[in-house]
Amino acid sequence: MAASQGTGPSTSSGLSAEEPITLTASGGARAVVLPQGAQVVSWTPADGEERLFLSQHPSGGPGGLRGGVPVIFPQFGGFGSLPFHGFARGLLWDLVAAASHPDDGRPHGPGDGEAMAEFALRDSEATRAVWPHAFRATLTVHAGGPRLRVALGVTNTGAQPFSFTAALHTYIRVADLAQTTLEGLAGLRYFDHQNGDVMRMESEPRVGFNGPVDRIYYGVPGAIVAHEPGRQLRIEAAGFPDAVVWTPWTGAVKNLESDGYRHFVCVEAAAVQTPITLAPGGRWRGEQTLIA
Ligand code: TA6
């Protein structure tokens, strides 16, 4: 069954191009994805609690919606000459496929009954003007049971190699950031962008928050677990070697309500330290899975 969608213009697949896509899995998990930026903006696992933060502040234009899972490609942050965090989050992606599985009362095995959507972005005159490469990127979202899986794929469709950095800039919703800790980072080297762009070593078994944090942890070997009083979220990644942890710890950020920062921490699956290089015809894929 097709995922529910609005009545906007159609893509070549016949699916709506601009309306939010709502994915419903058997068991009740639900995710909402916008073709603008292929940005997941809501995820409710089968237990019924929203797990992604989305600012209620009026959006400041394309790519300005703060929250959910912005797609960062082909440049992370200011590490290069492109606009900050690249251009993918500001562009309209094509909806390629979508499927929902509203509850039918049957038992489902792992993966069975998941809802999914796939979006694609190709190079255009506008992208080639700032980044002279031919590519096809896909963003695939699977929601089912306690899991949300978001995968970014990139193919070099041109005749020259290219390199890029990328991230899934996930805004994890928390009740109170001051009572939230992250486990799984101890012993890792990180780039401390908040405090003078220096390298440090993480010594804390659980990283807590009482001020701004902007770090790139290199070579994350396993899952990161976000602990809150009474609940946890497990964050797994594959293909993305690094993890970015960010909180502005202030409301003075564009498109964020004044106390909004208290209700999220960004834990981003990222490829930043070593850019990914693709030869002509080469493919790369990275994914992040959230497990409630
Ligand atoms: O991923 C962390 C970061 O690069 C921070 O430095 C911070 O600026 C954040 O992203 C948000 O960027 P944005 O362009 O969405 O305001």
Image (cartoon, grey):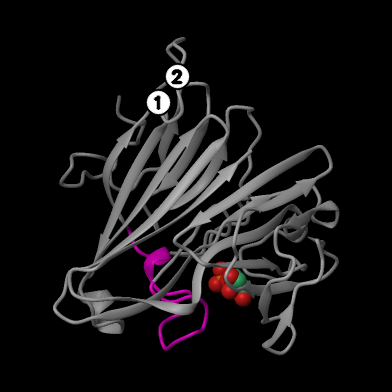
Q: Residue at x 51, y 67 (%)?
A: 241
Badge 1, how many Cα within 10 Å: few under 14, some, many 20+?
Answer: few
Amino acid type at circle 1 is: Asp
Place of residue 101 in the rendered image (x, y in percent of width and height, measured from the top left): 39, 23
* Residue range (magenta): 74-92
Q: Residue at x 67, y 77 (%)?
A: 190
* Residue marked by disc 1: 112
Place of residue 129 in the rendered image (x, y in percent of width and height, measured from the top left): 25, 83
As drawn, is 267 to the left or to the right of 232?
left
The quadrant of the image that shows the C terminus is: top right
Q: Residue at x 79, y 46 (%)?
A: 228
Q: Quadrant of residue 91?
A: bottom left
The quadrant of the image that shows the N terminus is: top left
Secondary structure, magenta segment, majority class: loop
Callout 2–callout 1 Cβ contact below 8 Å: yes
Place of residue 61 in the rendered image (x, y in percent of width and height, measured from the top left): 47, 65
Secondary structure under badge 2?
loop
* Residue marked by disc 2: 108
Residue 231 included in the magenta stretch of the image:
no
Amino acid type at circle 2 is: His
Q: Residue at x 62, y 69 (%)?
A: 254
Q: Quadrant of residue 108?
A: top left
Q: Ligand 1 shows up in which quadrant of the image?
A: bottom right
